[in-house]
């Protein structure tokens, strides 16, 4: 069996997606997601110009060998561009293997460990009451777990608060939008949001919150402590994690569960966090961390330390990543939760998929492979549009973490 051809498809049905299609001499093809928000064309070129020529003629069944070839063979290891490209190839190859076996991918991974994959949705509003009303709406839709983000008094923009409902999309300007951040205003406010949510909804639902890298370790420790009465499922990305040791300080001060890792690319980014039990949930997902092959390695390592998975699932991860992640989530023994930000109907039409939502859980479906395809005619209707994530500055103009 041989890889005959491979192509990269860039489409923008409301936001940009980079998709890889690998075709074989047996007529079976596989699909992988290579989207890297705001840097899409870099991954496209990495694939087209540097990697795909090395794939043609290879046996697509040798997933591990191809992974190692791309990782070790690049010489320049790791990084989001390289690892997103490797992920796309790996995902497409697993799709091919499962289709050849006539099995849904989760069967090939070892079979389902659970019936449904618990997901969390995003409730956000301009103020506490609007956010609370959104939480109510998610509860009505059947969600058991809800992430809550609110506008902060005195700040024009807050992370996670969109202009629309359901389809919040932060990368929506042709050049990076500048936002202003103030830690003190946020720190004073965040506990009030959860105080209100618990007062209104009680403690039956899981509540989550994303700090989005804005705090220093000691500030994060203080926020974690302040949020303890509200029994969060997790506090996410409380501080940037390049220095994995930072989490020790947070950990020493609070029992609020900690999640991190949506921007991590490899097991090396989370090795210390996991083996020192400094976190509770690892957020790496298929497209960002080298595909199914590498994600599985991270999850198995995490299981040794009772760290559970919580795959990133924002809209910049295409339905291909969502489909593949759901098969992974269905299998992985140390599953925690899956993020689920809904794609627009236009995106869903470009990527027909077998997965579906029911009563707070997603189900991967029974199609052979990962169950997500790309409709190329539909994709061609939406050309690439430059779009960037915002940046953040402090009130005095200092660059900060968005
Ligand atoms: O591209 C950036 C988004 O994926 C990120 O801002 C979303 O933090 C995020 C989340 O938890 O979904
Ligand atoms: Mg996040």
Image (cartoon, rainbow, N blue to C red):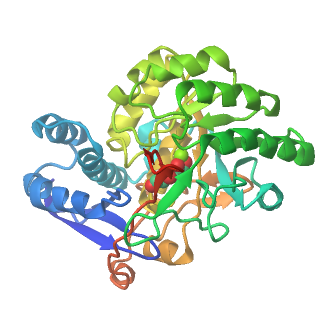
Q: Does residue 72 lie above or below 343 as drawn?
A: above
- Left or right of 107, for residue 358: right
- Left or right of 132, for residue 373: left
> What residue sits 38% from the left and 72% below the top?
174
Of 103 and 244, which appears nearest the observer? 244
Give percent across and percent down for residue 391.
44, 55
> What residue sits 38% from the left and 71% below the top?
374
> What residue sits 25% from the left and 47% below the top?
86
> What residue sits 52% from the left and 22% below the top?
247
Give percent across and percent down for residue 384.
32, 76
- Left or right of 361, for residue 318: left
Residue 83, located in which quarter of the rendered image?
A: top left
Residue 70, located in which quarter of the rendered image?
A: top left
**Disc count in the image?**
0
Q: Does residue 334 lie above or below 342 as drawn?
A: above
Residue 342, located in which quarter of the rendered image?
A: bottom right
Asked whether residue 43 is in view, the answer is: yes
Asked whether residue 28 is in view, the answer is: no
């Amino acid at each position: 069996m041989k890889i005959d051809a491979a192509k990269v498809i860039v489409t923008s049905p409301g936001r940009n997606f980079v998709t890889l299609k690998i075709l074989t001499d047996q007529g079976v093809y596989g699909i992988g997601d290579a989207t890297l928000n705001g840097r899409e064309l870099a991954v496209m070129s990495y694939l087209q110009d540097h990697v795909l020529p090395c794939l043609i003629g290879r046996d697509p069944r040798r997933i591990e060998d191809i992974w190692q070839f791309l990782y070790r063979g690049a010489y320049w290891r790791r990084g989001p561009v390289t690892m997103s490209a490797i992920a796309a190839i790996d995902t497409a190859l697993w799709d091919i293997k499962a289709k050849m076996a006539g099995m849904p991918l989760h069967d090939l991974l070892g079979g389902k460990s659970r019936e449904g994959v618990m997901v969390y949705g995003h409730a956000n509003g301009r103020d506490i009451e609007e956010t609370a009303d959104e939480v109510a709406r998610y509860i009505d839709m059947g969600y058991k777990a809800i992430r809550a983000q609110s506008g902060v008094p005195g700040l024009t923009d807050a992370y996670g608060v969109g202009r629309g409902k359901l389809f919040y999309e932060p990368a929506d300007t042709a050049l990076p939008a500048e936002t202003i951040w103030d830690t003190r205003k946020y720190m004073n406010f965040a506990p009030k949001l959860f105080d209100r949510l618990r007062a209104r909804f009680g403690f039956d639902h899981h509540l989550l919150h994303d700090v989005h890298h804005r705090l220093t370790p000691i500030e994060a420790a203080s926020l974690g402590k302040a949020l303890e009465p509200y029994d969060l499922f997790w506090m996410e990305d409380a501080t940037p994690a390049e220095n994995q040791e930072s989490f020790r300080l947070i950990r020493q001060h609070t029992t609020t569960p900690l999640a991190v890792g949506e921007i991590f690319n490899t097991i090396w980014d989370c090795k210390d966090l996991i083996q020192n039990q400094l976190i509770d949930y690892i957020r790496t997902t298929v497209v960002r961390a080298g595909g199914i092959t590498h994600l599985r390695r991270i999850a198995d390592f995490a299981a040794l330390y009772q760290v559970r998975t919580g795959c990133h699932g924002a809209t910049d991860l295409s339905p291909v990543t969502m489909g593949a992640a759901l098969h992974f989530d269905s299998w992985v023994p140390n599953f925690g939760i899956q993020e689920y930000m809904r794609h627009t109907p236009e995106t869903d039409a470009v990527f027909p998929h077998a997965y579906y939502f029911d009563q707070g859980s997603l189900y991967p479906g029974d199609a052979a492979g990962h169950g997500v395809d790309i409709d190329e005619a539909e994709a061609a209707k939406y050309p690439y549009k430059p779009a960037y994530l915002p940046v953040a500055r402090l009130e005095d103009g200092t660059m900060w973490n968005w």
